[in-house]
Every structure is written in C-alpha cells, then in structure tokens.
Amino acid sequence: MRHLGLLAGTALLAACGGSGDEPAPAEPADTTEAEAPAEDTADAGDAAPAPDNTETVDGTTLANFTGDASAGEQVFAQCGACHVVEPGVNRIGPSLHGIVGNEAGQVEGFNYSPANANSGIEWTPEKMFQYLENPQRVIPGTTMTFAGLSDPQDRADVIAYLESTE
C-alpha cells in the first residue's frame, strides 16, 4: 500500500512540473574551517517583479504569440491535478474560472497563502504570461509548487484556454 502512495505522489509531482526523480542533495563539503553566517546575497534582480511589471526571464512577451485555446486545453491538463475551470470548484488550488482580469488571491472559498492574497496582482493576460513562466519568482512564498511553463507558446495557449472558459 505504501508503494501506491509513492506512485500517486510521483504522479502529482510530474503533473505539476516536477519529476519526482530529483537527485538527493549533495553532501556538504568538509567544513574544517568555521563557516561564516549566511549573508543576504539577494540583489535587485532576485526580488519579485512589481505587480504591474510583466517582464519575463526569457525576454518574451505575450504580444509575440497567438494563443490557441484548444492547444492550451491540452497543456492545461497538467494543471488539472490541482485546478479546474468550473466556477466555484476549488481543489488543491483554486478554480481558475474567470481568473483572467481578476485580482490574485480572491477566489471565494479558497484559503490562499498570504503571499498570494497580498500580492496586489491583477491577472492581466500579460501578468499571467509572466507568472506561468515561474510562479515562485512572481509571487515568492506562494504555496503553489508548479515549476512553470518554459515554452512561451504553451503559456500563451493556456491563457487563451482560460479566457475561452469564462
């Protein structure tokens, strides 16, 4: 029975962008010297983009792509372990019905992380395009574990699909 739980967990990670086969962390190097306390090495480039900033890491913009809703529905299938587009149906993640154009963290009946609920983000198509590239970059502290969609066409297609379900 334990193996069934492991398989289900691996399938969920795969659906959310993880493989479940990540290598174990490397053993720390010999630390014969005293280690200095960790410093905050974050620079301005590591900070979350402002709510109105839509710049992507890969430099693409939504305007460069034409989304295909039917292709987006297929890409969205990997989101289906946590999200649906039916109104009022929350799962591990909130319903994404009507999400485009709405404020982040406001789907009724869903318990959002403070990071998401207080992000100040409006889900414009451009902001969603940025978010889908790397959710943790856009909303640090979000509890969504999805790694993102590296293919900008996939992101444009998912947005077209979400807009088509409203």
Image (cartoon, helix red, strand yellow):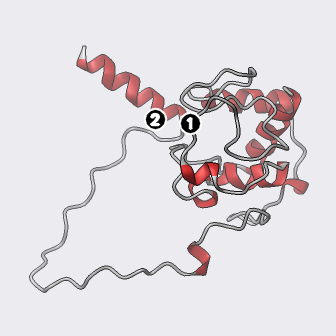
**Horizontal arrangement in the rendering, residue 138 relative to residue 101 (left or right):** left
User: Horizontal placement of 137 versus 12: left or right?
Assistant: right
Q: Residues within 10 Å of mark 2 (few under 14, many from 20)?
A: some
Q: Residue at x 79, y 48 (%)?
A: 123
The amino acid on which the numbered mark 1 sits, given as a three-letter code, is Asn
In the image, residue 31 sits, relative to residue 96, either above or below, namely below
Q: Pick out the residue farthest to the top.
A: 1
Q: Nearer the viewer, residue 60 or 166?
A: 166
Tell me which residue sits at (61%, 32%) in the image. 110
Quarter where residue 108 is shown: top right
Circle 2: element type: helix
Could you say where residue 94 lies in the image, as x and y percent from the top left?
Answer: 64, 32
At mark 1, the secondary structure is loop
What residue is at 70 percent from the left and 35 percent from the top? 107
Disc 1 packing (10 Å; few <14; some 14–19; many ≥20) = some
Instruction: Look at the image and tell me in which quarter the N terminus lies.
Output: top left
Closest to the observer, 37 or 15: 37
Identify the residue position indicated by label 2 in the image.
Answer: 13
Amino acid identity at mark 2: Leu
Instruction: Check disc 1 and report the residue beneath it.
Output: 111
- Nearest the eye: 2 or 95: 95
